[in-house]
Amino acid sequence: GLLAALVVGLGVGPRAEEPGSPRIAPADAPNLMLLVWDTTRSMALSPYGYDRETTPHLAELAKKSLVWEEARSVSCFTLTSHLSMLTGVYPSHHGARLTRMFFDPRKTPSLAHLLREHGYRTGGFVGTNVLRAGTGMMDGFEVYDDECDPLVVDTHAWKLVHDVQSVMAELLPSFGGNGSPHWIEDFARPAPEVLERALDWIQVDDERPWFCLINLYDVHWPYLPGDASREKWVRAYEGSIDGYLFDSNGYETPSGEPLGSRLTAEDKQHLRDLYDAEMWQLDRRVHQFLSAL
């Protein structure tokens, strides 16, 4: 059976650990999935009473699921919160933080590690390089797919190009890219690619039960919904704010004025519309994925 746990709240491609000698899982061991909608706000979800039907498929799943009405993340940072979900300990114990993007699995083994020892096959598929394998996130996973950007961006030559462009962006705005002064590196990949790779792995002919971690990063800034969801959710707007927020090339801040102080009610509504459109789009994609299992 499938137990889907939905948590609302760079790699060099799929990586495989050396095979060990795990135990054989019981015949009735369930398949397990930890499916994370990264940076999702509960107040924007239909199951939690949001007045716009942004996540109808999630709402249907919630009707036949155990739903937590109150939940607190141990951290506001993706890596530390994911490691806590996988290890069951606070960031103060596993040691990872924004200024120390590393986890030592020898001190605190992850759920993937324990399940693999008990006969599960384990796979991780993530949509952000914040969860790249080098942080220690791949502990216990037979396959860990963290390829968010082309391989070239992990080289010293690319780092030099990136640094030069960053300096040029300070001098010439045309070199800036809405707060991200690089061309082919965006540190993330869309849900369809992540879900497709996860589905291919799940459907591999293997008699062992599986544990699958999936991280979806689509509703993280910038808010860039597709045409269909934009048409459905985004109302007419003529202001300067777009999905890149204050990093947008089109946003101008008067000298000495704090960022955000110029936002009007219309600006804020536009941002909510963009976010809702992203949420509705992700809900449809996850539904399609779960229906294909």
Image (cartoon, rainbow, N blue to C red):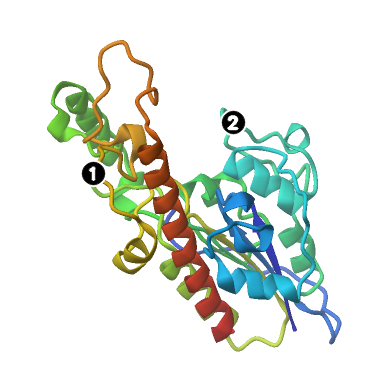
The residue drawn where x is 23% and y is 45% is 183
Q: At which x and y percent is residue 22?
A: 78, 71
Categorize mark 1 by other alpha carbons within 10 Å: few (<14), some (14-19), many (20+).
few
Amino acid identity at mark 2:
Arg
> The residue tagged with tag 2: helix, strand or loop?
loop
Count up the numbered dots.
2
Q: At which x and y percent is residue 89?
A: 80, 43
Which residue has dot 1 on it? 238
Categorize mark 2 by other alpha carbons within 10 Å: few (<14), some (14-19), many (20+).
few
Q: Are marks 1 and 2 in contact (CB under 8 Å)?
A: no
Which residue has dot 2 on it? 100
The residue drawn where x is 77% and y is 66% is 115
Instruction: Point out the image quarter for the C terminus.
Output: bottom right
Lateral position of residue 221 relative to residue 5, left or right: left
Q: Quadrant of residue 94?
A: top right
Spatial CA distance of label 1 from label 2 is: 42 Å
